[in-house]
Amino acid sequence: MFQDLDVRYDNSFRQMTPEENDTALVFQGDAVLAAQREGELVFPRYGVLSPALRAGVWRYVFSLGERPVFLGAWEGAPMPGCRFVPSREYRGMGPKEAVFAAAVGESLHRWYGSTRFCGRCGRAMEDSQTERARVCPACGLTLYPKICPAVIVAVSDGDRLLLTKYRGRAFTRYALVAGFNEIGESIEDTVRREVFEETGLRVKNLRYYKSQPWVFTDSLLMGFYCELAGSDRITIQESELSEAGWYPRAEIPGDYSPISLTGEMIERFRRG
């Protein structure tokens, strides 16, 4: 998965200012400022940015290996040799640590942009001085980065795996049943509910596999394997899915995401 890095990721909160050789993450919408060299993302160093960019607000967000990474606001045109690379494009690039940095930075960029003002009293929010949070100086409302719990579910029936495709999304590859946890609901009940809502199937023998921070959508994914309980007749939720079907292990299509928990779980089942 794309967060399985060869360098250490350290997201401890620190009060720091950027230095010349620190990595700069600059976003325009969901696109990150970067150069491309042989299909790989290369982020600019803070020291080579334009004076307008350097004069903006910079926040330390994390370190990869020994190199600090800072998040800044976009000002003016891209610097020579760089362009704004959209999320749908950089997901398929490398190296993994650059894709991961861009995704985490994009999530924080969205969060800072959506927490400029207090939702309780309307005052301008400020950065906390002790943790990664936004604080209202008037009423004290404190907001933390958005993380939404969700499930990825691999439903099997003997040698068959249930595969789906989303409806109305840019992502058109095969996937597993997925959905967000709802208020007051255990994560196991989310598995059962989402499978039934999307496919009309009942499941049993839930087995937790692993998790993945899917920061492209501010989510924390939790993967489960489970088995069919009862009828194998599928009734798809047409508002969510364009198709769903059973695929024998030897006939599972190879068209699924290589960087996601979904892809890893499909491949793990395919290989037995």
Image (cartoon, rainbow, N blue to C red):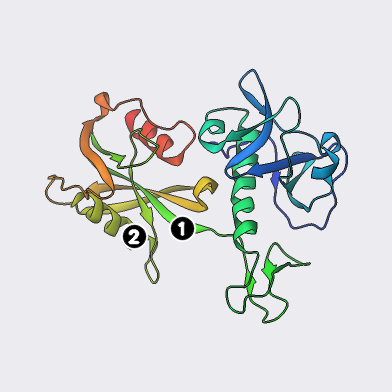
Residue in the picture at 32% in, 53% down? 206
Q: Is residue 81 visible?
A: yes
The spot of residue 94 in percent (x, y) is 60, 27
Q: How far is the residue under mark 2 from the one under mark 1?
A: 10 Å
How dense is the environment of label 2, judged by Cα within 10 Å: few (below 14), some, or many (20 and up)?
Answer: many
Q: Secondary structure at mark 2?
A: helix
In this orientation, which residue lies closer to the viewer: 80 or 85? 80
Left or right: residue 138 compared with residue 214: right
Which residue in the protein does label 1 denote? 149
Residue in the picture at 69% in, 74% down? 136
How dense is the environment of label 1, judged by Cα within 10 Å: few (below 14), some, or many (20 and up)?
Answer: some
Which residue in the protein does label 2 denote? 190
Q: Give the amino acid at mark 1.
A: Pro
The spot of residue 26 in percent (x, y) is 70, 42
Q: Is residue 159 visible?
A: no
In this orientation, which residue lies closer to the viewer: 123 or 192? 123
Q: Quadrant of the C terminus?
A: top left
Whether residues under marks 2 and 1 lie with C-beta atoms below 8 angstroms apart, the answer is: yes
Left or right: residue 63 compared with residue 255: right
Looking at the image, residue 111 lies above or below residue 212: below
Residue in the picture at 63% in, 57% down? 113
The spot of residue 138 in percent (x, y) is 70, 81
> Which residue in the rendered view is the most extreme toward the top?
38
